[in-house]
Image (spheres, helix red, strand yellow):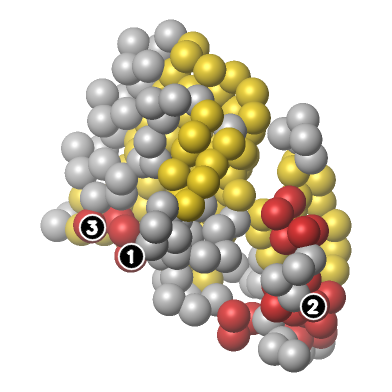
Amino acid sequence: MTHKEKPYILFAHNQNGEITQTNITQEQLGRIFFNEGDRQWDHIHMVLPEPAWDKFYEDGRLIYEGFTVDQKAFGAGKAFYKDGKPMMEGIFGIKGLLYGKEYYPNGMIRFEGSFRLNQAYGPNYPVYGSWFDEEGKLLFHGKFEFFRSSIGYPLVDKPKGFTLLKHPLSTHHLFMWKDARKYMPQH
């Protein structure tokens, strides 16, 4: 079986934040991805070719361990701050987390939930989940709303005060793909 014949696993979320899983072909994926009018893309999280387990180090410190494709986080994994504390963990796709947890540098959970795979400029952003303060107090639970800045970068509108996690430059390359479209047929 060639790479193009292998089924892709499509993860999606519904309005309640629940994750579903469906096998699709590369051709079906391409039709969804390249049709900008197809609102189905708003609910798609990940298409998984064949990932490999890997570990990445910087200055002798582990900064990521988990599944990768083309040396980018893709699938189940965990990223760490330079001091070894967890930064994020869960299911990764192009441009960052798709479902999982983000942590503050002090090790406390910051966000847990699902993210939207961003087709445009910028990282993935939360669509449903829970936001906590640095002491662990729940600040918000539910559906997140966003808008795009003048340059197209996603910004969270609701809840007020929530900002996207800034990846240290050392780990930024693990999550930001230059072009994942090579896995999808163009029409």
Residue 49 appears in the picture as rendered: yes
Q: Which secondary structure, mark 2? A: helix
On the image, the x and y values in percent for residue 40 come to: 79, 58
Residue name at image x 70 percent, y 78 percent: 34
Is 126 or 94 nearer to us in this picture? 126
State whether residue 131 is above or below residue 89. Answer: above
**Marked residue nearer the N-terminal end (2 or 3):** 2
Residue name at image x 22 percent, y 57 percent: 169
Is 65 or 75 nearer to us in this picture? 75
Residue 100's tag is: none
Q: Amino acid at mark 3?
A: Ser
Residue at the left extreme of this rendering: 59
Is residue 108 found left or right of 67 in the rendered image? Answer: left
Q: Which secondary structure, mark 3? A: helix
Distance from disc 3 to disc 1, alpha carbons, whole Å, reads 7 Å
On the image, the x and y values in percent for residue 118 come to: 55, 58
Distance from disc 2 to disc 3, alpha carbons, whole Å, reads 34 Å
Q: Which secondary structure, mark 1? A: helix
Q: Quadrant of the C terminus?
A: bottom right
State whether residue 36 is above or below residue 156. Answer: below
Residue 75 appears in the picture as rendered: no
Residue 31's tag is: 2
Answer few, some or many: residues within 10 Å of disc 2's Cα (few below 14, many 20 plus, some between 14 and 19).
some
Distance from disc 2 to disc 1, alpha carbons, whole Å, reads 28 Å
Q: Which residue is mark 3?
A: 170
- The image quadrant of residue 85 is top left
Residue 173's tag is: 1
Contact between marks 3 and 1 (CB within 8 A): the answer is no
Residue name at image x 47 percent, y 38 percent: 156
Q: Amino acid at mark 1?
A: His
